[in-house]
Amino acid sequence: MKLQIAAFNHVLNQHPAVRDELTRFSGRRVAIMLPPLAVSGVITEDGWLAACEGEPEAVIRLKHSVALATLSGRQPDLADITLEGDTDLATAVARLVGGLKWDAAEDLSRVVGDVAASRLEKLARGMLGFKGEIAWRLAENWIEHLREEAPLLAKKSQVDGFVHAVDMLRDDAARLEKRLLALEAAINQKNS
């Protein structure tokens, strides 16, 4: 959960106005869920999200169509967002979080510099379209999360190992069945 909070706070860092608004809800526990990803914690006095114990007071559940709508530049449908718990808190936080956008070019500029980041952004926009590039990276990160953080998908080596173990178990069971049949035949022959 710490990684999710750190990523959420990283995006918040790019939006100081949203952080200022979140300070109104200092001390309140919230959760934002886009299965299988979830971030939950307590809002700090500085507008950050921090890990905490206890159930969230408000839960914002998003369907995957919300992420797709955001990537395509349109507003998500209200039917794709479910608010639970304190609906006033959930509504306010959902409104604020809905305005968050990750500025990948800003992060890239810290690594390669402003000029190179600008050129790379133009290249990405020209080749795949920037939204397509972001969607691809999100999909890669989501699949990695499913494999590493919340193992819902198995790695190929794990599947191969499982199949090999099942084959060995099947062969062992077949040999055991043959031995049992041979023992039964020997016992029946002895008793006859």
Image: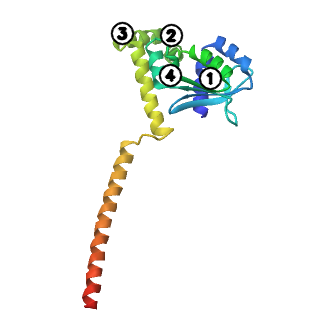
> Which amino acid, by three-letter code, is at mark 4?
Asp
Res 164 quadrant in image: bottom left
**Circle 3 Cα neighbour tier, 10 Å, few/some/many (<14 / 14–19 / ≥20):** few
**Does residue 46 sit above or below 115 in this rendering?**
below
Label 1: element kind = helix
Distance between mark 4 and mark 2 Cα atoms: 37 Å
Give residue 131's position: percent from left, percent from top: 42, 15
Q: Residue at x 69, y 14 (%)?
A: 21
Distance between mark 1 and mark 4 Cα atoms: 24 Å
Q: Name the quadrant of the N terminus.
A: top right
Q: Earlier in the sequence, mark 4 or mark 2?
A: 4
Label 3: element kind = helix
Check contact, mark 4 vs mark 3: CB within 8 A. no
Q: Residue furthest front?
A: 79
**Does residue 140 sit above or below 154 in this rendering?**
above
Distance between mark 2 and mark 1 Cα atoms: 23 Å
- Is 91 placed left or right of 183 in the picture? right
**Circle 2 Cα neighbour tier, 10 Å, few/some/many (<14 / 14–19 / ≥20):** some
Would you name the residue on which mark 4 appears? 80
Q: Earlier in the sequence, mark 1 or mark 3?
A: 1
Check contact, mark 3 vs mark 2: CB within 8 A. no
Q: Earlier in the sequence, mark 4 or mark 3?
A: 4
> Which amino acid, by three-letter code, is at mark 2?
Asp
Res 86 quadrant in image: top right
Would you name the residue on which mark 1 appears? 9
Res 169 quadrant in image: bottom left
Disc 4 versus disc 3: nearer the observer: 4
Would you name the residue on which mark 3 appears? 126
Disc 1 versus disc 4: nearer the observer: 4
> Which amino acid, by three-letter code, is at mark 1?
Asn
The one nearer the camera, 192 or 40, is 192
Would you name the residue on which mark 2 appears? 114
